């Protein structure tokens, strides 16, 4: 018979521990730079959209592409054929060491971005790279499960995690698509790819276990978002191989679940 061991809580009494109740405190009160003038950015949007369409490209399903923007340019990303999520990376066009910082963006704004929130660069720069200015899905809000759209919770799907889950090798993820695009189109490396802005994706955390969840994207053909560049940018977008993200990572995703995304860049005259 094995010898019984005393409880590590022995001597603390039998009464369950009680914890004091406190109201939530917002850890990062928004600095002035995180609060934009809505009138100013509405005007910037108008000036760009009534200017010139300087670039149009379609990101094929399960692939990624890159493009550049000048300060003040407006980018519209449209759900081109059917429900589809996208993963966005941003770099300072003149200094690729300065790139999008999803964690700090989340702290300064929220886990899911809304119109007039900004996308921030990494340390030691910590500057607004772009400002979110329009969303046809803005009325979705926060649903009954805490789900919301356009998260900056963190990572892109990747083949390393796929192997961890399934035990199988694969090349076919947002990470591998972004790596291929920046290598072939911009001469960059895997180390340049970073955590993303998950556009059109409905996500949250379960109330009981606090696990990251996703729901099928509510985006339909014709839905779009727009953002304005606050510096000269290099942008990369993956049309996620998870399609509308109605299936968990590790499950086979039918090709009909995946669609392209359309990119348009507008510039004021």
Image (cartoon, grey):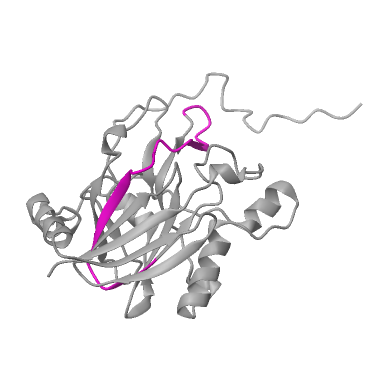
Look at 30% across and 49% down and name the residue there. 225
Look at 59% across and 40% down and name the residue there. 248
Tell which of 94 and 50 is nearer to you.
50
What segment is highlighted magenta in the picture?
207-235
- Image coords of residue 47 (percent x, y): 11, 61
Query: Is 94 positioned to the left or the right of 46 in the image?
Result: right
Query: Is 85 positioned to the left or the right of 41 in the image?
Result: right
Look at 77% across and 31% down and name the residue there. 5
Query: Is 187 positioned to the left or the right of 159 in the image?
Result: left
Where 144 sits versus 184, above or below?
above
- Image coords of residue 115 (percent x, y): 23, 47
- Which quarter of the rendering shows the C terminus? bottom left
Task: Give the tally of numbered discs.
Answer: 0
Q: Is residue 42 magenta?
A: no
- The residue at the far top in this view is 15
Tell which of 86 and 165 is nearer to you.
86
Look at 26% across and 61% down and name the residue there. 130
Where 223 sits versus 105, above or below?
above
């Amino acid at each position: 018979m094995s010898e019984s061991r005393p409880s590590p809580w022995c001597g603390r009494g039998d009464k369950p521990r009680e914890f004091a109740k406190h109201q939530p405190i917002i850890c990062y009160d928004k600095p002035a730079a995180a609060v934009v003038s809505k009138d100013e950015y509405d005007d910037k949007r108008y000036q760009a959209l009534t200017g010139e369409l300087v670039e149009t490209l379609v990101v094929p399903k399960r692939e990624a592409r890159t493009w550049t923007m000048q300060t003040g340019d407006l980018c519209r990303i449209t759900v081109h054929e059917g429900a589809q999520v996208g993963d966005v990376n941003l770099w300072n066009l003149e200094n690729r060491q300065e790139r999008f910082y999803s964690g700090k963006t989340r702290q300064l704004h929220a886990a899911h971005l809304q119109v007039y929130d900004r996308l921030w660069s990494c340390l030691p720069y910590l500057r607004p790279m772009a400002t979110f200015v329009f969303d046809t899905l803005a009325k979705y809000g926060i649903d009954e499960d805490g789900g919301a759209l356009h998260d900056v919770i963190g990572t892109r799907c990747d083949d390393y995690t796929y192997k961890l889950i399934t035990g199988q090798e694969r090349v076919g993820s947002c990470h591998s698509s972004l790596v291929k695009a920046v290598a072939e189109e911009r001469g960059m490396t895997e180390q340049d790819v970073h955590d993303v802005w998950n556009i059109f994706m409905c996500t949250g955390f379960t109330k009981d276990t606090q696990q990251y969840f996703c729901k099928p994207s509510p985006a339909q053909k014709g839905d779009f978002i727009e953002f304005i560049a606050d510096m000269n940018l290099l942008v990369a977008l993956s049309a996620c191989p998870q399609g509308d993200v109605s299936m968990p990572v590790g499950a086979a995703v039918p090709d009909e679940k995946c669609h392209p995304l359309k990119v348009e860049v507008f510039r004021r005259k």
